Amino acid sequence: MDDFHPELRRMARRLPRTVITKRSLPVLRTLSKAMDRKAAPTDVEVLTLSSGVGVRLHRPAGATAPGPAVLWIHGGGYVIGSPSQDDAGCRKLADQLGVTVAAVKYRLAPENPYPAALDDCHDALVWLAGLPAVDPSRVAIAGASAGGGLAAALALAARDRGRVDVAAQVLVYPMLDDRSARQAGLDSANHRLWTQASNVFGWASYLGGADPESAVPGRRTDLAGLPPAWIGVGSLDLFHDEDLAYADRLREAGVPCDVEVVRGAFHGFDGLAPKAAVAQSFFADQVDFLRRNLTQTESAEA
């Protein structure tokens, strides 16, 4: 069993193994709503689309022509969370890449099971690709945890629905496969924040009565034709095995896929220790992937 990364060891010893459960959900949602009530930073536009979907828009400084964009999808086990929690990361993406970043406020389970969240994300993607400041041929989708799972599902939906040709997908320790919720021997004493108990609750809430063969990205067999992918995960993350398995299947389907495994990192480590060198390197790898897949065309044309 891996030990914790040296930069994360002290924090890991203080963190709980499980946070999101049916019992803790009301408290966590109250905290999330309190965060949402805070005034948005002056450089964030808070919008509501005609479909009712909420969006937080981060525009790059000095942009004068249609350019690349990223649709960001927040995490929270499909049951909690808000795009406001990722304002800092979205602003960093916008500034470092010079791209428009839209963070979507999708409907949460269990009140709104599949496909509500996916449909909200698709509505936001179509809207983003249609903005005058955005080049629709250079739009990426990205997300963390459940947001990474939704990003993977959105890549499949965008391919199948044919309204936006997604340029790239960034899946940050994505929640991809409901079968890991009950897989024997998968849970570990070194998992933090997200365990099989949380996973059972999250997936049951999201799926409702849906057929998992079509709703769960990790169960899909038709992966050909998807955009290039980046998948990053810690070796002490419950999603480690399913994420690497999905990367292998993407490659088998002919989809380019970069993989970054952070030895000794637990779920959500980068959000809890953003100043640690290991977290900054993890983020820089995502930025590099997006730069290669979103701005290389622009550089070649210049």
Image (cartoon, helix red, strand yellow):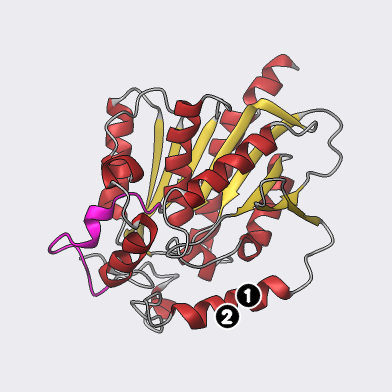
At horizontal 25% and vertical 51% (from top left) the residue drawn is: 241
Residue identified by numbered label 2:
30
Task: Name the residue nearer the viewer: 64 or 110.
Answer: 110
Residue 75's spot in the image, x, y percent?
49, 60
Q: Quadrant of the N terminus?
A: bottom left
Residue identified by numbered label 1:
33
Disc 2 residue type (three-letter): Thr
Give the CA separation, mark 1 to mark 2.
Answer: 5 Å
At horizontal 53% and vertical 61% (from top left) the residue drawn is: 277
Q: Would residue 121 appear left or right of 102 to someone viewing this image? A: left
Task: Name the residue nearer the viewer: 131 or 282.
Answer: 131
Residue lying at the far top of the rendered structure: 301
At horizontal 68% and vertical 60% (from top left) the residue drawn is: 87
Quarter of the image where one finds residue 100: top right
Residue 258 seen in the figure: yes
Tell me if label 1 and label 2 are in contact, CB under 8 Å.
Answer: yes
Q: Which contiguous range is marked in magenta?
A: 174-190
Residue 71's spot in the image, x, y percent?
61, 43
Residue 275's spot in the image, x, y percent?
59, 66
Task: Name the residue nearer the viewer: 177 or 172.
Answer: 177
The answer to whether 291 is drawn above or below residue 270 in the figure is above
Element on which disc 2 rests: helix
Residue 182 on the magenta segment: yes
Residue 183 on the magenta segment: yes
Q: Would residue 268 appear left or right of 58 to someone viewing this image? A: left
Element on which disc 1 rests: helix
Q: Would residue 147 appear left or right of 67 to someone viewing this image? A: left
Q: Would residue 258 appear left or right of 211 to someone viewing this image? A: right
